[in-house]
């Protein structure tokens, strides 16, 4: 198995684990972490795609790396916004859940 | 589509840059000027939108701009076809209407900066810029960034008042949206890995039917459905749209959910024209039909007016997805394929006006009464006749009665369903219309009833705001006068495979 395939598989596993967490766990903080796990997996896939030289046939492709950087910035802002909302919710009701019955 | 940038392409840049400049200025000079900046930029943005539509209409071609003069696949393209132009124009008109309406609700503070007006006016411009970026984006990754910008601008609008339940609604909305966007991004990686480009036009030339394309498009579609709140991903929508302040609800329900729908249309008809699988389209249709029936029935059972309207959005989003089983990959050139496509797009546009008007009318009613319980609406028809009239006009479009944009849209879907021999969708359209009639009538009957005790109004509602709501509702009605055939503007720049018949 080549290194690229290994990276690709790792990315796929991360995405799978993250999806599982996002769907199964009811706590918002765990969902936010799971989202970041999926994000990590997707960025790893971008890396694998870059190393394969995409379809262009280069030794390596710089475009996915530029995309990854942007993706990381977006995922970071998303996490920051989600955590800020969660913190504010915690200040208001004293717990960090979305269940209304408490 | 042309391979080079076209004259007038700078208009596309302006459509994004104007609102973004407004956002930056508002943050830089402080909250007391945010309203003024937003209101100054609105006519300018409207002029740009009209100019884009005029150029696309006059040249009968796609308006195109390459950022930094770098051609795709290295550069990023902005493209406006007829569909983009129509959506940009709808957005500009609605943003202006909502802005005029919101002035009384989010007035600039006289001395110290307050949070809500600053955030509202800034985010209004941010939503506008992000929507325009979605409508003209020609690159799938750029579209991902635009979608995320839209989410980040829309989520805080839900919890402007900072109450615990709106915070929870905003957080749930954000979690669904993040789930959707990461699936979309995953699909984009797969497409890049297989074809080496994310440009829509280049991709549409090289994409081939196969496991990679199926997987990528399925992931992206599923992610976009979560953002568009199609059943069964609708759970986040009612609390978020009903909890937001009225002008924010109008933006969210009227415009924001249309952006992911727009991208599904782009993916299915532009990125892979003629490749989409009919079975998959049937699945989208079934989800849409379930959304129509489920959303309408739940709307009938609501106690609060704003929640009723929010569930009606869940139902109306369902209509948008009826276009897929009717328009996808029937033998090329069948007339109903184009009719269904046009019906779906017209439904998106007319619902935007109708639902925005309805949410604003509900906001005025809630302001005047101090509550929005449907059982307590008696007498409001006498106190706020103009507002209730606007509500009824918007209701026409939701029910699909003439004259209204909703009627034209639903009539086209209906005709297409019958002509294509898929009569079951026609039944759903009719049942949805009856149910919508039920919940609109439920509200109007209460509002027009006489109240036994004299109605005490909490606050007086200015005529100007009521006039704005009527004007927005009238836009939905006026759309009913477009001819009952595929509109020429919307067809500009469509791949040939989709165009056909009825011309």
Image (cartoon, rainbow, N blue to C red):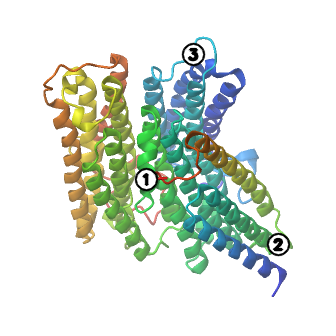
Which residue occupies the extreme bottom position in the image? A1
Query: In the image, B374: left or right of A13?
Result: left
In the rendered image, the quadrant that contains the N terminus of chain B is: bottom right
Q: Quadrant of residue A11?
A: bottom right
Q: Nearer the viewer, residue B479 or B375?
A: B375
Which chain does tag 1 point to? B
Kindly check if marks 2 and 3 are in contact, taking CB atoms under 8 A apart as contact.
no
Q: Which residue is mark 1?
A: B491
Give the mark toward the camera: 2 or 3: 3
Q: Is residue B400 visible?
A: no
Badge 2: chain ID: A
Whether residue B395 is visible here, answered yes or no, is yes
The residue indicated by pointer 3 is B109
Task: Name the foreground residue: B260 vs A21.
Answer: A21
Label 2 Cα neighbours within 10 Å, binned few <14 / some 14-19 / many ≥20: some
Nearest the eye: B342 or B363: B363
Q: Are marks 2 and 3 on the same chain?
A: no
Estimate the spatial distance between the alpha carbons at disc 1 and disc 2, rounded to whole Å: 40 Å
Q: Which residue position is annotated with label 2?
A: A51
- Tell me which residue sits at (28%, 59%) in the image: B293
């Amino acid at each position: 198995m080549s290194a690229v395939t290994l990276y690709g598989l790792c990315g796929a596993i991360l995405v799978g684990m993250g999806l599982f967490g996002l769907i199964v766990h009811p706590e918002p903080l765990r969902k936010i972490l799971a989202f970041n796990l999926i994000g990590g997996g997707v960025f790893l896939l971008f890396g694998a795609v870059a190393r394969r030289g995409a379809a262009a046939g280069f030794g390596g492709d710089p475009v996915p790396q530029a995309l990854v950087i942007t993706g990381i910035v977006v995922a970071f802002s998303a996490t920051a916004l989600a955590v800020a909302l969660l913190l504010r919710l915690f200040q208001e009701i004293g717990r960090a859940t979305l269940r209304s019955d408490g | 589509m042309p391979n080079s940038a076209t004259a007038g392409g700078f208009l596309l840049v302006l459509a994004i840059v104007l609102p973004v400049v407004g956002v930056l200025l508002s943050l830089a000079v402080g909250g007391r000027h945010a309203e003024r900046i937003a209101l100054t930029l609105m006519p300018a943005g409207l002029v740009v939108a009209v100019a884009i539509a005029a150029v696309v209409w006059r040249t009968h071609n796609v308006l195109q701009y390459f950022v930094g003069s770098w051609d795709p696949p290295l550069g990023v393209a902005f493209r406006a076809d007829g569909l983009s132009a129509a959506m940009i124009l709808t957005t500009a008109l609605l943003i202006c209407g909502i802005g005029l309406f919101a002035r009384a609700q989010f007035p600039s503070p006289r001395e110290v900066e307050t949070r809500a007006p600053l955030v509202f006016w800034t985010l209004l411009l941010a939503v506008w810029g992000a929507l325009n970026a979605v409508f003209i984006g020609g690159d799938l990754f750029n579209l991902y960034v635009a979608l995320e910008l839209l989410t980040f601008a829309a989520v805080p609008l839900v919890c402007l008042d900072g109450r615990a339940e709106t915070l929870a609604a905003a957080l749930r909305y954000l979690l669904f949206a993040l789930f959707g966007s990461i699936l979309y991004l995953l699909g984009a990686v797969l497409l890049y890995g297989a074809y080496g480009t994310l440009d829509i036009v280049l991709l549409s030339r090289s994409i081939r039917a196969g496991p990679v394309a199926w997987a990528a498009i399925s992931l992206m579609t599923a992610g976009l459905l979560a953002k568009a709140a199609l059943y069964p991903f609708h759970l986040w929508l009612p609390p978020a749209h009903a909890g937001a302040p009225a002008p924010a609800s109008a933006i969210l329900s009227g415009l924001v959910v249309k952006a992911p729908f727009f991208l599904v249309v782009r993916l299915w008809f532009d990125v892979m024209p003629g490749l989409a699988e009919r079975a998959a389209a049937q699945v989208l249709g079934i989800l849409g039909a379930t959304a129509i029936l489920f959303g309408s029935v739940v709307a009938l059972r609501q106690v609060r007016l704003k929640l009723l309207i929010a569930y009606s959005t869940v139902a109306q989003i369902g209509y948008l997805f009826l276009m897929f089983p009717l328009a996808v990959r029937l033998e090329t050139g069948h007339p109903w394929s184009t009719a269904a496509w046009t019906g779906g797009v017209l439904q998106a546009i007319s619902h935007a006006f109708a639902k925005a008007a309805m949410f604003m009318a509900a906001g005025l009613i809630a302001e005047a009464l101090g509550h929005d319980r449907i059982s307590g609406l008696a007498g409001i028809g006498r106190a706020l006749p103009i507002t209730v009239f606007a509500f009824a006009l918007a209701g026409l479009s939701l029910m699909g009665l003439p004259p209204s944009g909703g009627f034209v849209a639903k009539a086209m879907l209906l005709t297409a369903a019958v002509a294509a021999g898929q009569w079951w969708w026609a039944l759903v359209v009719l049942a949805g219309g009856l149910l919508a009639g039920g919940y609109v009538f439920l509200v109007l009957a209460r509002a027009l009833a006489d109240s036994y005790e004299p109605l005490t109004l909490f606050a007086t509602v200015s005529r100007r705001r009521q006039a704005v709501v009527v004007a927005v509702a009238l836009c939905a009605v006026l759309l009913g006068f477009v001819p009952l055939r595929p509109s020429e503007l919307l067809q500009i720049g469509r791949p040939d495979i989709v165009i056909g018949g009825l011309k």
